[in-house]
Image (tube, helix red, strand yellow):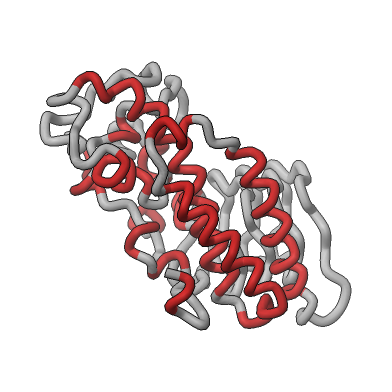
Amino acid sequence: MSQKHEVPLAGGDRPGLRADCANCFGLCCVALPFAASADFAVDKAAGKPCVNLRADFRCGIHANLRERGFPGCTVFDCFGAGQQVSQVTFGGQDWRRAPGTAGRMFEVFPVMRQLHELLWYLTEALALPQARPIHDDLRRALDDTERLTRGSAEALVETDVATVRQGVNALLLRASELVRAEVPGRKKNHRGADLIGARLKGANLRGANLRGAYLIAADLRNADLRTADLIGVDLRDADLRGADLTGSIFLTQAQVNAARGDTATTLPAGLTRPAHWS
């Protein structure tokens, strides 16, 4: 795919990197565990179907997940891994009608999800004109990662995702540096910082490095986050009302869904304002 585009589509514009629940066997509702908390109303073990999963692999309370105590489900994003595992890796065999596939399918899903997340970031990096000096390296990484997603179930389970992620992350960091270098002045570096509950209302975080920072329940009202690197930032319950995230990089829909915002919040192209913000 990367060979067909001088500048590839942004991650959000690649259908294969968006969840297609109609072509997935409810894998996120079965393969992954969750614990009773503010995000989930009940405990569920890995490999056990959620009590709300219907026979057609759809969620029985999808329209009311937040009201029923499952807001965690509304922020999860598989980046298209569900349909890839269901329709490609396992050729359309579902774990109910072919129970012998269940164990391996549930092992493959979290691996595929991580690989698809990397594809999302790599595709976004390739769409950044400032990252042109490393486009060749990014394309190679994209092709190599896509090749892994087409492997057999056995090969996928044995994939050393940590090593793959390490190599990709080095390229993404370089792309981030190239983008943020165009922002004038000194940029803040809060990489990996504990900013839980921080009072950052109106803060100038333009071009900041916030990679992996914890901004849970932080007050970011009217903050300037333009061109900030937000990869891996924990934005659960962060207040983004009025914040400007124009041009921010590596922000995902799942992060946006986990935060709070309003009609005055400005999001990067390709991301949508969650329904619960209204």
Name the foreground residue: 16 vs 270.
16
Residue at 71% x, 67% y: name it: 176
- In terms of image quadrants, where is residue 32? top left
Residue 189 visible, this angle? yes
Residue at 83% x, 69% y: name it: 187
Residue 243 visible, this angle? no
Q: Is residue 269 left or right of residue 219?
A: left
- In terms of image quadrants, where is residue 134? bottom right
Q: Is residue 170 left or right of residue 139?
A: right
Name the foreground residue: 212 vs 196.
212
Farthest residue, direction right? 186
Residue at 77% x, 81% y: name it: 182
Residue at 25% x, 35% y: name it: 26
In the displayed structure, 156 sits above or below 174; it is above
Q: Position of residue 167 (x, y in %)?
A: 69, 51
Q: Is residue 175 left or right of residue 114?
A: right
Q: Is residue 99 left or right of residue 132?
A: left
Assign the C terminus to one quadrant of the image: bottom left
In the displayed structure, 135 sits above or below 11; it is below
Q: How many marks?
A: 0
In the displayed structure, 46 sits above or below 114; it is above
Q: Position of residue 124 (x, y in %)?
A: 54, 68
Assign the N terminus to one quadrant of the image: bottom left
Q: Position of residue 186 (x, y in %)?
A: 88, 72
Q: Position of residue 153 (x, y in %)?
A: 38, 34
- In terms of image quadrants, where is residue 108? top left
